[in-house]
Image (spheres, rainbow, N blue to C red):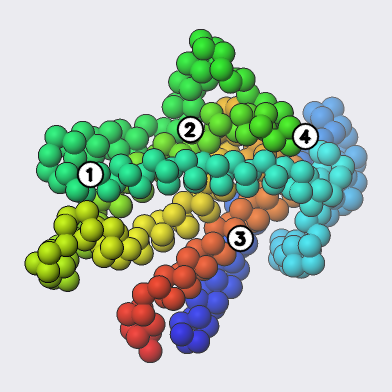
Amino acid sequence: MPTYLLGRLVSLVLSLIAASIVIFLVIEVVPGDPAQFMLGLNATPAAVATLRETLGLDGPLVERYFTWVLGLLQGDFGLSYTYKVPVSGLIAERIWISIPLAIYALVLSTLIAFPVGILAAVRRNSATDVSIMGLTQIGVAVPNFWFAMLLVLLFAVTLRWFSAGGFAGWQDPLMALKSLTLPAIALALPQASILARVMRSSLLDTLGEDYIRSARAKGLSQGQTLWRHALRNAMIPVLTIIGLQFSFLMAGAIIIENVFFLPGLGRLVFQGITSRDLIVVKSVVMLLVFAVIVVTFFVDVTYALVDPRLRRATR
């Protein structure tokens, strides 16, 4: 186990370094000068040059990269060009919308996927199984932003059960959750479809094992065999997918947050791109990548704790 853990830690550090380099270079090659954008088209070259020097945009590329990375390691995300406030403050305000939204969507997708996947596995090759697999295929194929717009048309415009967008704030938790419900459903649909298919596949593989047939031969009913033996062993790959889905929901909500005008991290990234606020974009994207890599690391460690075969293979 120590060898496996050390290997995963090395992989985590290397992944973070590679991600930081890619993010920095991609943001740097985006066309448009932030200083020119902030001063307008009528700004003189001298004024643009002065502002670039003030923002630290005229230094060597390598120096700017290491300055940015060292700032991240110290918790200093820099100063926003547009808002003139520390980026860490903007992140602290927005993250309390993005994290609850991701958790809400993950809970909904799990509550939908588990019974659906189990039902499809138990009714294998039946009309129920075929119907469920067809619906999950549609769920995977349908873009979540298109589904989000359908939800707005139905529940906000037609039925008026929910607002079309915005966030009510956490002063009233019930209203806040109501504001996040439609976005969470839009995010949860494709994830529930994926999770249901993984649940069905994993459970079918487990039901075909010899110890399941032995349990049935000893007199256990299909339901007892399913709940006592098959389901717990089938959960290992499913739990892995759930962990990876949370990191995806954190990093993949940019479009949904803009559809519903939620002031989360995704919308902050979008606003930073449109206003050429490079320091905001770099810092928030790096934070989201960090969350994805760290969650993946903990999923791998949990997987090794649950499945001793992985630890033996590492040794």
User: Disc 4 to disc 1, how far (Cα)?
Assistant: 42 Å
Most foreground residue, 192 or 8:
192
* Image location (x, y in percent) of residue 43: 86, 32
Viewer-nearest of discs 3 and 2? 2
> Is disc 3 placed on a helix, strand or loop?
helix
> Is disc 4 placed on a helix, strand or loop?
loop
Query: Hey, which residue is sitting farthest bottom in the picture?
Result: 315
User: Disc 4 to disc 3, how far (Cα)?
Assistant: 30 Å
Query: Hey, which residue is sitting farthest front in the picture?
Result: 219
* Residue for badge 1: 120
Image quadrant where one finds the C terminus: bottom left
* Residue for badge 2: 186
Q: Are marks 4 and 3 in contact (CB under 8 Å)?
A: no
State which tag comes first along the sequence, 4 or 2.
Answer: 4
User: Disc 3 to disc 2, how far (Cα)?
Assistant: 24 Å
* Rendered image: mark on residue 290: 3
